[in-house]
Amino acid sequence: MNWKKIGSFAIVIILIPITLAIGVVLFKGRKYNIISIAVALLACVPNLLFFEKGKADTRRMVVIAVMVAIASVGRVLFSPVPSFKPVTAIVVVTGIYLGSEAGFFTGALTAVISNMFFGQGPWTPFQMFSWGILGFIAGLPVLQKILKSSVQGKTLASRLPIVVYGAAAGVLYSMLMDVWSTLNMDGTFNLLRYLVLLGTGIPTTVIYIVSNIVFLLIAAKPIGTRIERIKIKYGI
Amino acid sequence: MDHFSSYHPSVLLVYYVIVLLLTMFTVHPVLLVCSLLGGILFFAATNPLKALGKNLIFYLFLFFLLALTNPIFNHRGETPLFFMNDNPVTLEAILYGAGVSVMLIGIMFWCKCYNQVMTSDKFVYLFGKAIPKLSLVLSMALRFIPVFKSQMKKISQVQKTMGLYTSDSLTDRVIGSIRTLSALLTWCLENSIETADSMKARGYGLKGRTNFSIFCFRMDDGILLAALGAFLCMSGVGYQQNVFEFYYYPSVSPIPTGAGAYLQYSIILVMMLFPSILEIKGRIQWKLLRAKI
């Protein structure tokens, strides 16, 4: 964390409440759908801005582009199986091996690119933020260490952290996306509707959890070792 | 398909942002119906009838679902129709559900059209200057997708020549595809580094580079942009005069009428129907020209 980064986070921490306040004053608190899109986009800004302004190596950028492409292709390949997608797993692996920023970046861009095949819409900013934040959390230094050793672990017990993270990621993704569904259907945040949506979404959430765990257990290790190898070989 | 989408990408983006914001911004039934009509017509003008029918049936179902379930979550409103589990089912809640679902379906249709009009090259072109690194990664990732596909084919063919046939048994096929995917993954990462080095050698990231662009800003684009600006100003005036003021709770407000309101409605209708009018006009022109031959 350097000053530049803290600065860009501070801007967003100030900007989001201002957006909310403007929304409440201007629209008398009724246009939550537009405000929520603005907030979701703003939440993506600090990470994207930091990447944009930072001195990212060309090599590093290209590796991230590969990860975005793999995640998008994975989503397209698994399109016949509803909700059973490898995107979160690949984003999490990127976060673990290339750091928080790369994780966020991969998640956010995968949402944009794969939605070119699945359809863009007002939900895109929410997917950007949801996938991005899952990759970001996985890359946080403390968690990164635990998850990394867990990915490479051989015994079942040592693999537990990655399974737990996969499950938590599924639940978090579901909860974040249902905020959007509620706002979209209601115009205001109706807690009852949110809870009902979460409840009726339980089967989907379970599929998210299962797919995250399955893909993390199968794919995390081979992808991880290859990224490590590239990192050592080319000094990224 | 290429009458509306031949406009400059920036103009197209402005148009879509205005349409989507206007649609999400309001619960005014006239505006919502205009937007829905525009979305459906544009979709119909650019897609086969079969696709339209399929979508219409699906969204009709969604419409009834949303309109009928809203009273379960909302008990506001003054006109209870009947009571369910001691909770009033109000007329206002049903109407509000209907209004919001018209908004939702309108947005869905506009987004479907957006995906057809704003192709990825336009997207990258638009954001390339503002966010160069982001859009570079975007366009590279987009390019990697077909590259992966063709490389995967090559790898599996090579594996076959090496004698690694896959039989019909499922486990064998799964193992075979895992082998291919693993080779693909290594290749992708290695190859991407090569790309990066090549880019660096050609001076990527140095100052004074120019971008190739295939889009040029023509007279028509300027006219449409000016018209959109004028439209926004008109809408601002309408907002000031409370023409777009509409509420469902506690009781449904009357739809604003009068000369000013009708003027606003008709302008919005023209604006929402603009792409489909352009498409239909183009079709007719094409037919006439062909008939002359």
Image: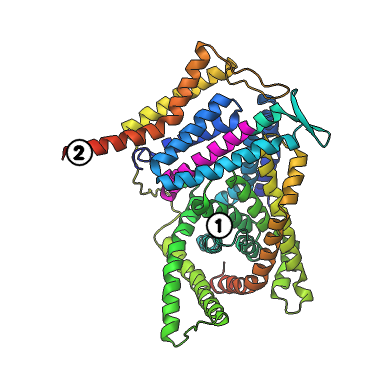
Whether residue A194 appears in magenta in the rendering, the answer is no
- Per the rendered image, the range of residues in magenta is B98-126
Q: What element carries label 2?
A: helix
Query: Looking at the image, is B139 positioned above or below residue B76?
Result: below
Residue at the image point whose x is 53% and y is 55% from the top: A114
Query: Looking at the image, is B256 positioned above or below residue A199?
Result: above
Disc 2 and disc 1 on one polypeptide chain: no
What residue sits right under mark 1 in the picture?
A: A56
Residue B286 picture location, percent across and down: 26, 38
Residue B16 picture location, percent across and down: 48, 36
Query: Looking at the image, is A196 positioned above or below residue A18?
Result: below
| Marked residue chain, label 1 | A
Query: Looking at the image, is A228 positioned above or below residue B52?
Result: below
| Corner quadrant of residue B45 | top left
Q: As shown in the figure, which amino acid type bears the numbered disc 1? A: Ala
Left or right of B115 on screen, residue B291: left
